[in-house]
Image (tube, rainbow, N blue to C red):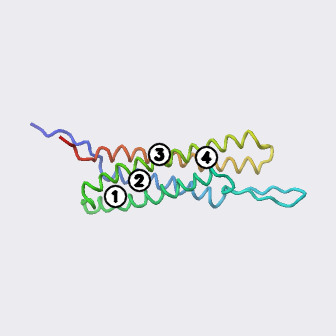
Amino acid sequence: MAPPPSTAVSPIVSLLVRILTFVCLLISVIIILITNTYTQSSDFGDVKTKFTDFRAYRYLLGAIVIGLAYTLFQTALTIFLVSTGNRIGGDGMLQLDFYGDKVISYVLATGAAASFGMTQDLKTLVDRSDSGVDKFLSKADAATSLCLLGFLFAAISSIFSAFSLPKRA
């Protein structure tokens, strides 16, 4: 009789999903940190608005940075697994993968949700005829969308790590 099929996901597929998560989060943080500012000229001088002026965007940045750090760590471990065929830490590391992936995916989801909500609120409150404000909010939406995509990849990693858990009798 043939053995039952394995439900474990190939380490290469897992590595690909982690790399996609990392790339989405990295691009998102670049959009937020480097490019998302807005300067309004007025009779009293220039007023510069940055993403750090809004708590939801700071939360998004924190979620992305935590997600980047965890994903980079897990990507390094997965590269080690793919190259050597050995898992560092054994079954204990499988537990860390499982619970860590769950926590990180939820952190990314809440960061994206808070930022989407903030952007929608700002769109209703500000004069969007000014192209600078519209550009600022569009960049925030783009960064948030990439974070949401990163969440989806992290959630897929979470599902894959659940498949890798040892089966209990």
Q: Earlier in the sequence, mark 4 or mark 2?
A: 2
> What residue sits 57% from the left and 55% below the top?
61
Q: Which mark is residue 115?
A: 4
Look at mark 1 in the image and give the residue it sits on. 78
The mark closer to the camera, 4 or 2, is 4
Q: Residue furthest left?
A: 1
Q: Earlier in the sequence, mark 3 or mark 4?
A: 3
Question: Amino acid under label 2?
Answer: Arg
**Label 1, label 3: how many angstroms apart (C-alpha)?**
21 Å
**Label 4, label 1: how many angstroms apart (C-alpha)?**
30 Å
Question: Amino acid under label 3?
Answer: Tyr
Q: Which mark is residue 122?
A: none
> What residue sits 31% from the left and 62% below the top?
80
**Label 3 crowding class (10 Å Cα cut-off): few <14, some 14-19, many 20+?**
some
**Label 2, label 1: how many angstroms apart (C-alpha)?**
9 Å
Question: Amino acid under label 1?
Answer: Thr
Whether label 4 touches label 2, CB < 8 Å: no
Q: Secondary structure at mark 3?
A: helix
The picture places residue 6, in percent across and down from the top left corner, at: 22, 43
Look at mark 3 in the image and give the residue it sits on. 106
Look at mark 2 in the image and give the residue it sits on. 18
Q: Earlier in the sequence, mark 2 or mark 1?
A: 2
Q: Is residue 96 left or right of residue 135?
A: left
**Label 2 crowding class (10 Å Cα cut-off): few <14, some 14-19, many 20+?**
many
